[in-house]
Image: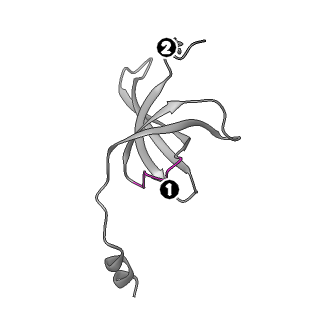
Amino acid sequence: MSPETTVERSKRKTLSGVVVSDRMNKTRVVEVLRLVRHPFYEKIIRKSNRFNAHDETNQSHQGDLVEIMGSRPLSRTKRWRVVRVIKAAPRRPVALETEAKS
């Protein structure tokens, strides 16, 4: 293939969710909420799934709204990667956190 030729990739699944854990290095736990109608009672129910997502640059933190995309298996649990941070959560200065603990 020449450099000018581009191969069209299939559309990959993308989801958006909130980072609930950023304790692991280069891994984020992202919780995705969805609304589902109950089959019998027809009430709208909130269901959530948690996905381990790869974050190469450790750019997302707990509370951030992020977009994740399906990818090849990166480990036993990681099948997703963080594409971008949609909305960052407000951050507290580190000095205030140390004063609050003492």
Residue ranking furthest to the right: 76
Residue 52 location, quadrant: top right
The spot of residue 18 in percent (x, y) is: 40, 45
Task: Categorize mark 2 by other alpha carbons within 10 Å: few (<14), some (14-19), many (20+).
Answer: few
Image-based side of 50 in relation to 97, left or right = right
Image point (58%, 57%), residue name: 24
Image-based side of 88 in relation to 59, left or right = left
Image point (40%, 82%), residue name: 101
Task: Categorize mark 1 by other alpha carbons within 10 Å: few (<14), some (14-19), many (20+).
Answer: some
Image-based side of 93 in relation to 17, left or right = left
Q: Main secondary structure of the magenta part?
A: loop
Q: Secondary structure at mark 2?
A: loop
The spot of residue 32 in percent (x, y) is: 44, 37
Sequence-wise first label, 1 or 2: 2
Residue ranking furthest to the bottom: 102
Residue type, label 2: Glu
Residue 22: mark in rendering: 1
Residue type, label 1: Asp
Image-based side of 99 in relation to 4, left or right = left
First to last magenta residue range? 56-62
Residue 4: mark in rendering: 2
51 relative to 102, above or below: above
